[in-house]
Image (cartoon, rainbow, N blue to C red):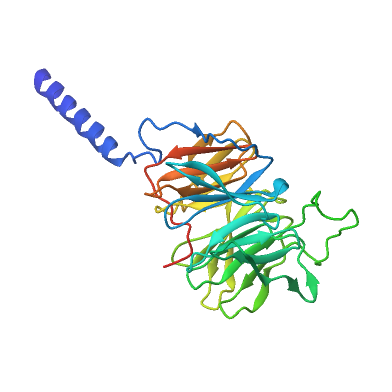
Amino acid sequence: MIKLKFTILIALSLFLNCFAQSEKKESIIAPNATLELVKSDYEFAFTEGPIADKKGRVYFTDQPKNKIYIWDEKKGVSLYTDDAKRANGLFFNAKWELFACAEENNQIGYFDKNRNFHVVFENYDGKHLNGPNDLWIAPNQGIYFTDPYWQRPFWAKDHKEVQDTKGVYYINPKGETVRIINDYKIPNGIIGTPNGKTLYVADMGARETFRYNIEPDGSLTNKTPFVKYGSDGMTIDNQGNIYLTTSNKVLVFNPNGELIEEIIVPEAPTNVCFGGKKRNILFITSRTTNYTLKMNVKGVDKGVN
């Protein structure tokens, strides 16, 4: 009888262990992957705004030096333009035109295939923007962007905040613009889901990120607290996980707002995106450096169906 009970206990233990293993989710980071410094012959002042093109090459900005660079996983880093209009956040539209928050003259615009800049939007209510920071282009090609106010050294000394609030704006596919958020302290990072139904916006001033439902007309409803962290930059993967940059980490939260991963970065990260041919390389801009990390998940941060 004792031997029978012992056998049953062993069998039960093995069953529970197997069940626990099956319930354990696979890590979002690739096996044996480590954070790698992106080697470059260029010296950076403050890298930001990464976004990948259709080949998986990552474009990123260096606003103080007024440049945009391209990172290729095989060829490394090269210069895209040395007249970046003081671009900060970047995003591609369906035509693969490179959109930018251009803070030189506080505009939203894009670089064409010849790298010429075209202004799409610059005035709201008859006044210039404060300083557009980050943007996301939805599947319908509507543009959401944040407009906080950070005093820039390349502005005139008497430059002042001109809008009556630090807001978030929406440019619909017809080119009509509305302010859709006006109750943030410092709106900054922004990203939406690939189906165009949910938007995440970080308030760095309140140190909180919120989630919204996106209505068919582009307006936002159902403001819901997501996590008690603000973020300079954000991205999303194919499991719906949201990536936020903090003082020394990239924090990853599942769609329920539960922390599932912490990626420690040697230098304070500013922004993040997925790149590489398979879109499975996390690219992290970190002021004077950049880092990559191979992942088990893939990026879906491009606003195209």
Q: In this view, does 134 lie to the left or right of 258?
A: right
Query: Which residue is located at x 52 percent, y 71 percent?
Result: 141
Q: How many labels does the image show?
A: 0
Where residue 91 appears, x then y in whole percent? 55, 59
Q: Which residue lies furthest to the front in this view?
A: 114
Where residue 164 appears, x then y in whole percent? 81, 67
Examine the rendering and report whether any part of residue 267 can be seen: yes
Where residue 229 appears, x then y in whole percent? 62, 46
54, 152: nearer the viewer: 54
- Residue 121's place in the image compared with 34, above or below, is below
Residue 42 occupies which quadrant of the picture?
top right
Please state, as top left, top right, bottom left or bottom right, where the C terminus lies in the image.
bottom left
Query: Which residue is located at x 59 percent, y 30 percent?
Result: 266
Q: In this view, does 84 lie to the left or right of 13?
A: right
Query: Which residue is located at x 59 percent, y 76 percent?
Result: 172
Residue 185 occupies which quadrant of the picture?
bottom right
Query: Which residue is located at x 51 percent, y 77 percent?
Result: 216
Q: Is residue 234 left or right of residue 24?
A: right
49, 147: nearer the viewer: 49
150, 93: nearer the viewer: 93
Please state, as top left, top right, bottom left or bottom right, where the N terminus lies in the image.
top left
Examine the rendering and report whether any part of residue 189 can be seen: no
Where residue 156 appears, x then y in whole percent? 87, 55
Q: Residue furthest top?
A: 2
Q: Is residue 47 left or right of residue 105?
A: left
- Residue 113's place in the image compared with 233, above or below, is below
